[in-house]
């Protein structure tokens, strides 16, 4: 992972998921680089609605694709999703939950922070008001 990879809250980018192993680089993190043309930067906790909508858009995330080492996702799995796909789902009312601490700051080039915050499933110390 690049040392300068930050999350949308400005902190260090935390891992998104290892079961199944996610990330464009399959490193468990929503790291991004020049090869990642789709910007796989939103750490989503996928829901049945989100998976169904993605399938309807031609982006089937539920069917295993062993040739790509892809197990197929189940509701509740964490996955680094393409920022524009998450935004489409958000606009259609089918957004997946978001782990802000594991969502790459590069997602903000496409998705407004407020939209991500509305679906946050983590409440980091720096936004909870308790610190």
Image: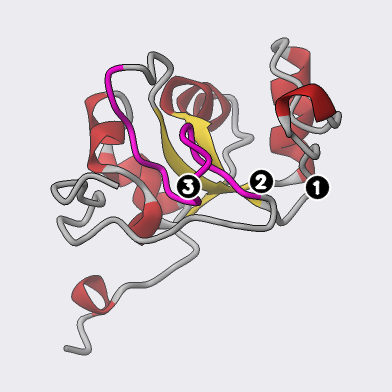
Marks 3 and 2 sit apart, C-alpha to C-alpha, by 19 Å
The range drawn in magenta is 21-34
- Label 1 vs 3, first from the N-terminus: 3
Query: According to the image, label 1 marks what residue?
Result: 74
In the displayed structure image, the side of residue 52 where residue 37 appears, left or right: left
Residue drawn at the location 56% of the way across and 56% of the way down: 17
Q: Can residue 65 be spotted in the picture?
A: no
Q: Name the residue under label 2.
A: 46
Residue 66 at least partly seen: yes
Specify few, some or many for label 1: CA neighbours under 10 Å numbering under 14, 14-19, or 20 or more: some
Please identify, in this view, whether the residue under mark 3 or under mark 2 is nearer the observer: 3
In percent of width and height, residue 59 lies at: 69, 17
Per the image, the residue denoted by label 3 is 27
Picture colour scheme: secondary structure
- CA–CA distance in space, label 2 to label 1: 7 Å
Q: Quadrant of residue 93?
A: top right
Up-down: is 104 above or below 107? below
SS for dot 1: loop
- Residue appearing at x 57%, y 28% in the figure: 89
Report the Cα–Cα distance between label 1 and label 3.
Answer: 19 Å
Q: In this view, does 84 lie to the left or right of 35?
A: right
């Amino acid at each position: 992972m690049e040392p300068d990879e930050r999350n949308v809250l400005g902190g260090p980018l935390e891992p998104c998921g290892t079961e199944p192993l996610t990330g464009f680089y399959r490193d468990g993190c929503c790291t991004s680089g020049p090869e990642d043309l789709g910007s796989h930067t939103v750490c989503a906790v996928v829901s049945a609605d989100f998976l169904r909508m993605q399938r309807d858009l031609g982006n089937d995330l539920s069917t295993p694709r062993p040739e790509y080492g892809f197990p197929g996702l189940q509701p509740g799995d964490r996955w680094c999703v393409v920022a524009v796909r998450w935004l489409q789902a958000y606009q259609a009312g089918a957004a997946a939950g978001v782990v802000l601490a594991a969502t790459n700051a590069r997602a903000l080039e496409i998705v407004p922070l407020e939209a991500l915050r509305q679906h946050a499933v983590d409440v980091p110390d720096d936004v909870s008001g308790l610190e």
